[in-house]
């Protein structure tokens, strides 16, 4: 009522709908191609109230259509430039190496039947500076197992 009815798309005859910052056509140019027509100020036809509704409802008796333009917010798309630097957190870094503690910084686990007991393996790993885990998960860097496993 405020702005009037929208005219059809001049390119394909489809309907115009409001989308973000302009009016876009919803029609098809061909069977395979959607219409890409967009406009910020479409042509409009006056809003007309039928006479029987004017007589039935008092609110519409004095209504007169005035042509108004819809004011749309200006959308400014800012281009973002992304510097192509390597992500330092994704780079795998080797731990500093100490010859006295060669397993320093490593989590070690075991799997399968081994000739040594788990307690013996755990003591040896800790003696060499590593940490022993009874479960194999994402933190484990070394798995000890037999040749058959």
Image (tube, grey):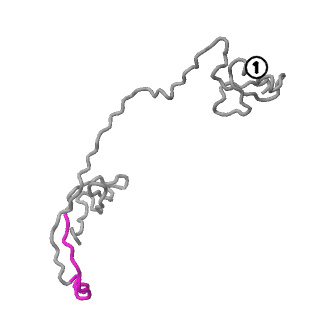
Name, please, the residue furthest toward the top. 99
The image position of residue 97, as x and y in percent, is: 60, 14
Residue 56, percent from left and from top? 26, 88
Q: Is residue 6 left or right of residue 87?
A: left
Q: Nearer the viewer, residue 147 or 25?
A: 147
Q: Quadrant of residue 45?
A: bottom left
In the picture of the structure, the residue carrying the numbered disc 1 is 124
- Residue 118 versus residue 6 in the image, above or below: above
Q: Mark 1, residues whose alpha carbon is within 10 Å: few (<14), some, or many (≥20)?
A: some
Please give the range of residues in magenta. Answer: 43-60
Q: Position of residue 94 (x, y in %)?
A: 57, 19
What residue do we see at 54% from left, 22% from top?
A: 93
Q: Tell me the SS state at disc 1.
A: helix
Residue 59, compared with residue 87, is above or below; it is below
Tell whether 92 sits left or right of 146.
left
Q: Nearer the viewer, residue 34 or 101?
A: 101
- Point out the image quarter for the C terminus: top right
Q: Is residue 12 left or right of residue 136?
A: left
Q: Residue at x 17, y 66 (%)?
A: 68
Q: Vertical placement of 137 versus 73: above or below?
A: above
Give the answer, above or below, for where 50 lies relative to 45: below
């Amino acid at each position: 009522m405020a702005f009037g009815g929208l005219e059809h798309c001049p390119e394909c005859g489809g309907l115009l709908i409001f989308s973000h910052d302009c009016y876009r056509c919803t029609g098809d140019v061909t069977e395979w191609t959607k219409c890409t027509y967009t406009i910020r100020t479409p042509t409009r036809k006056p809003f007309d109230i039928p006479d029987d509704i004017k007589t039935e409802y008092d609110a519409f008796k004095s209504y007169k259509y005035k042509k108004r333009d819809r004011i749309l917010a200006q959308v400014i798309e800012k281009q973002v430039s992304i510097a192509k630097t390597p992500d330092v957190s994704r780079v795998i870094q080797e731990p500093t190496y100490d010859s006295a503690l060669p397993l320093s910084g490593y989590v070690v686990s075991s799997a399968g039947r081994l000739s040594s007991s788990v307690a013996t393996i755990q003591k040896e790993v800790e003696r060499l500076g590593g940490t022993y885990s009874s479960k194999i998960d994402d933190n484990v860097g070394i798995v000890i197992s037999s040749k058959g496993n």
